[in-house]
Image: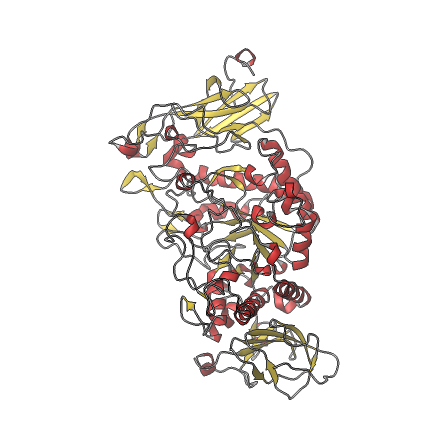
Amino acid sequence: MTMSHLPAELCQGRPAPLGATLRDGGINFAVFSDHAERIELCLFDTHGQRELRRYALSGPEDGIFHGFLPGMGAGLVYGLRANGPYQPERGLRFNPHKLLLDPYAREIVGRFAWRAEHHGYELGHPDGPRSLDARDNAAQALKARVAAPLPGRSPRANAPHTAAADTVLYEVHVKGFSMLHPGVPPELRGTYAGLAHPSSIAHFKALGVSTLSLLPVQYAVDESHLAERHLHNYWGYNTLGFFCPDPRLAQAAHRDDPSAVAQEFRAMVAALHEAGLEVVLDVVYNHTPEGNEFGPTLSFRGLDNKSYYRLAADDASRYENLSGCGNTLNCAHPRVTQFVLDSLRFWVAEMGVDGFRFDLAPVLGRGAHGFDPHAAFFTALRQDPVLADVHLIAEPWDAGYDGYQVGRFPGRFLEWNDKFRDSVRGFWLRGAAGASGRPAVGRGELARRFMASNDLFHHGRRQPTASVNFIAVHDGYVLADVTSYQHKHNEANGENNRDGRDGELSANFGAEGASDDAAITALRARVRRAMLATLLLSQGTPMLCAGDEIGNSQGGNNNAYCQDNAITWLNWDQAESQTLALVSAALALRREQPLLRHARWFVPASDPGLHGGDASISWFNPGGHEMQHQDWHDAGSHAFAARVCAAASSQPQLTLIFNPEAQALPFTLGRGPWCLALDSSGELQSSALLPQGTPLMVPAHSLLVLARASAPPTDFPQKV
């Protein structure tokens, strides 16, 4: 492109849609800013190195600057410059010397590197962030490239549409899953294509999960402190390009071509859909990489700092830090709400995804007086026709005041339930050597969490599926480390082991880290299988952390956000076959038994008619007697059982037995016959018919599921 091919001036544009849009033989540009005096469109050569021409956009019209560039098409590289007052004390940080990335960029060219000239102020100046840096950063700044329409139909066309009650989430990092996978070709490992490779899909299908919950895949940059230590933000929770798949997760041949990256991502989604698997994205609309007042000016800050960010009430030169990352997006502003919704619609309609997990989700509902479940953003989100049938999952806490909001999200939101995590760990790690964290959990607490936490979610017509149950996720110990470490080991992060959560509930069973003691390793695996069975058979929406099904360890690192290496990549060479088989069997049983994935709240077996005759549950001690008030508070007894009846039935269809003790215990069964459907310990013979009247010896550290059998009972081989 040369100067001679560019028109002398822009034509009048349209204020919608925002971003760069191909139309009528040219490109329409629309940019929001409530406080800018002028916004310039800057065009560059195809490599983004040489600025060719600047145009002043028309406006503002209802806060939108716009213009139409005739005769131009896809592939045009551009940036923005915003003119206005530089008055940090008023929250205004306009600096026309800084080239800004269009927040609506669908393709990004260049590679970001931390440089002093990316800051709107002069580093080292006595006035600090209130000074003005007049150096031009255009040569090194990221630029937008006008995107051509994506070819072919949207992968949304073959989306599976899994019902909430049938959903089983699998939280997975695109790169970490396949980077060491022996069945994935080397050139595809660690990529979108690798995640959709037949070997990967075969694993997902064998497990029985329905929905992949991907750690962030939107275009992210590394924080400056990581760059200084030659580390990378592996997790990706530092989004700058909210309409772009991250090129770092694409095949090497595609990474320098944003169009090829987008097509690889869409092909991944289409292939996973074809296999009946859904794709949910972990999205970060709570902060940006621009950080606090000491951060760079890359996009939002330079376009309209006062609108895009929540500023401190007593000093508009500083930022509210409800995200723990320096700044907080102001989702209460109508244009910021529009930006988030436009981004979500793009990922559904154009990229085909099936839903979102919102990082630090209370930020989205914060107004002047704190979190509001009826905030305008939630209202707009719930009525949006494009987003009407996709999963909405909240991480229901942020880093601000009154930030813990579990159970308070509206409508069809599902919510991560950390109380389930802590209860399951506390119950099964009871009395283990080298235990750390909070005290042991009683059977009453575990029963409540196992039944979808009605104390948190049984209100406002919410269903049990609202509780997203987990025992480990990307943040914190992976499950293998929950049973192998008493203390965190984050030394590789370069922060002297100060980062990450202290006192995380865990136990090392007598040896810190990997052990050559066969008894210790066997006991650890046994307890992990009991916890996994508890998770996968619980009421609510279970979520499995990728790698937990094969016993993957991170060496005790409970904050591995910056470890893009063997610490976080799944180690397939050391996969635990027995654990993998247990997970597959538990999820197969969940699919076969509707009462293990009941879409409504269970009612007490003592009076099911009072609640419309729905499915009911009753609880029993090992002696076969129904649990009384004093039993739930008996600190000396921990094992118990649940019997579940289908609607309008007085005969229990399932019995679940929990024995966290270090020794086998006899359990008196109810009227049978019963068939053993699952034994997490692996000691008992599966599918065996159980005799009536004879106590069943339940193995130590195990969860058993018994199903009502149609055949008469026979002698039952018991290994005790």
Question: 77 or 680, which is in the foreground?
Answer: 680
- Residue 256 picture quarter: top right
Question: Most extreme residue toward the right, as rendered?
Answer: 711
Q: Would residue 514 appear left or right of 330 to someone viewing this image?
A: right
**Residue 156 visible:** no
Question: 537 or 714, which is in the foreground?
Answer: 714
The picture places residue 692, in percent across and down from the top left corner, at: 67, 86
**Residue 698 visible:** yes
- Residue 187 picture quarter: top right
Quadrant for the C terminus, please.
bottom right
Quadrant for the N terminus, please.
top right
Above or below, 399 against 328 in this view is below
The picture places residue 329, in percent across and down from the top left corner, at: 41, 42
Question: Most extreme residue toward the front, as rendered?
Answer: 516
Question: Most extreme residue toward the bottom, as rendered?
Answer: 693
The picture places residue 296, in percent across and down from the top left corner, at: 38, 34
Query: At x 55% / y 62%, what residue is drawn?
Result: 463
Question: Most extreme residue toward the top, as rendered?
Answer: 4
Question: 564 or 614, which is in the foreground?
Answer: 564
The picture places residue 473, in percent across and down from the top left corner, at: 51, 56
Applied colour scheme: secondary structure
Q: Would residue 493 appear left or right of 514 to someone viewing this image?
A: left
Query: At x 66% / y 40%, what residue is drawn?
Result: 267
Above or below, 62 against 663 in this view is above
Above or below, 219 against 551 in this view is above
Query: At x 52% / y 30%, what residue is drawn?
Result: 19
Q: How many marks?
A: 0
- Residue 325 picture quarter: top left
